[in-house]
Amino acid sequence: MSANTPFLVFSGTHTRYLAEKICHSLDCPLGQMNIQYFADGEFSVSYEESIRGRDVFLVQSTFPNSDNLMELLLMIDAAKRASAHSIIAVIPYFGWARQDRKDKPRVSIGAKLIADLLGVAGINRLITMDLHADQIQGFFNVPVDHLYASSVFLEYIKSQLPLDNLIMATPDVGGTKRASSYSKYLQIPMVICHKTRQRANEIEDMRIIGDVADKDVLLVDDIVDTAGTITKAANLMLENGARSVRALASHAVMSDPATTRVIESALTEIIFTDSIPYLRETKKVTVLSVADIFAEAIRRVCHDESISSLYTIK
């Protein structure tokens, strides 16, 4: 790399696929880093080029397992000790975000803990996308650029889906604000699914608030984990007279048996971003890249430009 390059981009092991796309969009090479693994599962990271005085962008989603987070923390610490001018964590998927409050006695607030770990490690800024809860931005004592996948999704919706008969839906009450934003922007109706749970990942009951008869339903969510909620909502929509049901979600966590549930469900299609790698092949899953959005955010941060125009809807 040229000594005049204003910034450097590095990647952790399992987000390299996205970092390479980001670098292609930025027309810059991906920085050289070595990650050495030991027999006991421990690992160490080292930069294979000088980063002294540079703005360093570290691309790493913190999806399961926890090694991805630990790898990022070590990358941050190594960059700080190598005299980087600034360290910007680019975390397309911010894990532990569902632990954003105490929802029962004697539990941790995992999202706040992760924010503290990243801050102590030494980040100067965070760039992330579609946090499970917007208030997580306040857990950080550094600037947070919170991007949205809506611009990628809206382009796909307008070009690929039947807008004249489309209706937005949310698989739970917690996603009402998100679905409402799409509904208002596209000027289409919205319905809500109300669910109750007895324990995590197990739905006790679900009901539809609104009419979906003879409509093409588009469910919107931020995370699909086991796909229990989204597939149950899709099946319920079809049982209540929907003509077709699709879904879009920013982060494809897709823990087993999520893929099987999607394949066997009433969903015609489910659309994800590539914030998390989805490696299984099924005709029902479409993956859209958010590399260009992150690349543009990185470029604007480097040039002290506003990123607000990247927000189509929030």
Image (cartoon, rainbow, N blue to C red):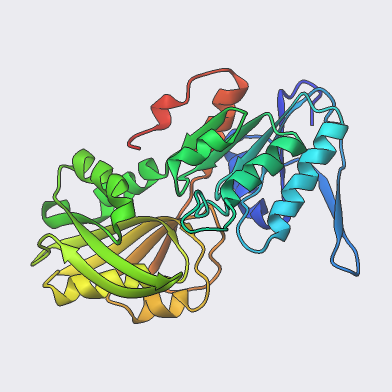
In-image side of 271 versus 180 (left or right) = right
Can residue 119 be seen here? The reply is yes
From where the camera sits, is residue 58 visible? no
Q: At 29% across and 45% down in the image, what residue appears?
A: 177
Horizontal arrangement in the rendering, residue 148 relative to residue 143 (left or right): left
Residue depicted at x 86% and y 36%: 49
Quadrant in which the N terminus is drawn: top right
Quadrant for the C terminus in the image: top left
Residue 180 image point, x, y percent: 24, 45
Query: Is residue 124 or residue 112 the one in the foreground?
Result: 112
Front-most of 107 and 27? 107
**Residue 258: where, in percent of width, then height?**
46, 74
Is 210 above or below relative to 91? Answer: below
Extreme-top residue of the structure? 304
Q: Position of residue 226 (x, y in %)?
A: 46, 71
Q: Which of 73 and 28 is in front in this view?
A: 73
